[in-house]
Amino acid sequence: DVSVDGDKVVISPGTYEDIYVVCNKSIELCTGGKKKVALQNHNHPVITITGGRMKLDGININYTGREHGSVLCKGGWPQIRNCNINSTGAYGVQVEGGAKPYIFKNSITNRKGRGIVVSKACGLIDSNEVIADRAGVYISGPAPADLIPQARPASPAPAPAPAP
């Protein structure tokens, strides 16, 4: 709670157990380089975002319980990029309550539940690798059409050859 809007919090390499972050500020949480940083919790979502423009970049976020998940976005305009998000709970990332996150280039794995859950919220989900037992991306309630950009083929298919 000592950080203020605009702060960049660089996490030293290591594994941090029983981490429970609740943030409503515009701060950046990131690694100090290429060394691994893992934030873990068994009883609560590892990170809950209730407002602000929080940025998560390059962090391993692991939830090992059953009831919750790794990241819960309840408000604000968070950016979640380049993270490895693992969960054994209901979700990897849940977006609700009017949150408008940018979820980009993450690896999200949930072998027991859903990868990304969106419930009455919007934002942008793009270029993620999602592996989940129940659903990769699950949308409940109204969501904007541009929440997930349409996949486009790399090049058009060649025209068929004329018949002889």
Image (cartoon, rainbow, N blue to C red):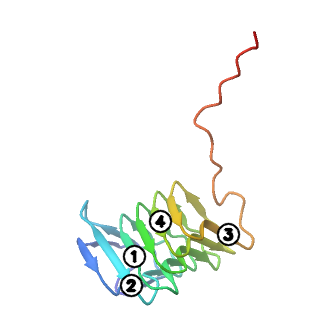
Residue type at mark 3 is Ile
Residue type at mark 2 is Asn
Number of marks drawn: 4
Point 61% across, 65% down: residue: 123
Q: Which residue is mark 4?
A: 108
Q: Element under label 4? A: strand
Q: Which mark is first along the chain, 1 or 3?
A: 1
Residue type at mark 1 is Asn
Residue type at mark 4 is Ile
**Marks 3 and 1, Cα distance to the nearest angstrom?**
22 Å
Q: Is residue 64 above or below residue 161?
A: below
Horizontal and vertical percent for residue 9?
Answer: 32, 73
Task: State yes or no: discs 1 and 2 in contact (Cβ < 8 Å).
Answer: yes
Q: What is the residue that sits farthest to the bottom in this orientation? A: 43
Task: State yes or no: discs 3 and 2 in contact (Cβ < 8 Å).
Answer: no
**Marks 1 and 2, Cα distance to the nearest angstrom?**
7 Å
Q: Which residue is mark 3?
A: 139
Q: Nearer the viewer, residue 81 or 152?
A: 152
Q: Which mark is first along the chain, 2 or 1?
A: 2
Q: Element under label 2? A: strand
Q: Which residue is mark 1?
A: 62
**Marks 1 and 4, Cα distance to the nearest angstrom?**
10 Å
Q: Which residue is mark 2?
A: 41
Q: Residues within 10 Å of mark 4 (few under 14, many from 20)?
A: many
**Marks 3 and 2, Cα distance to the nearest angstrom?**
25 Å
Task: State yes or no: discs 4 and 2 in contact (Cβ < 8 Å).
Answer: no
Q: Which mark is first along the chain, 2 or 4?
A: 2
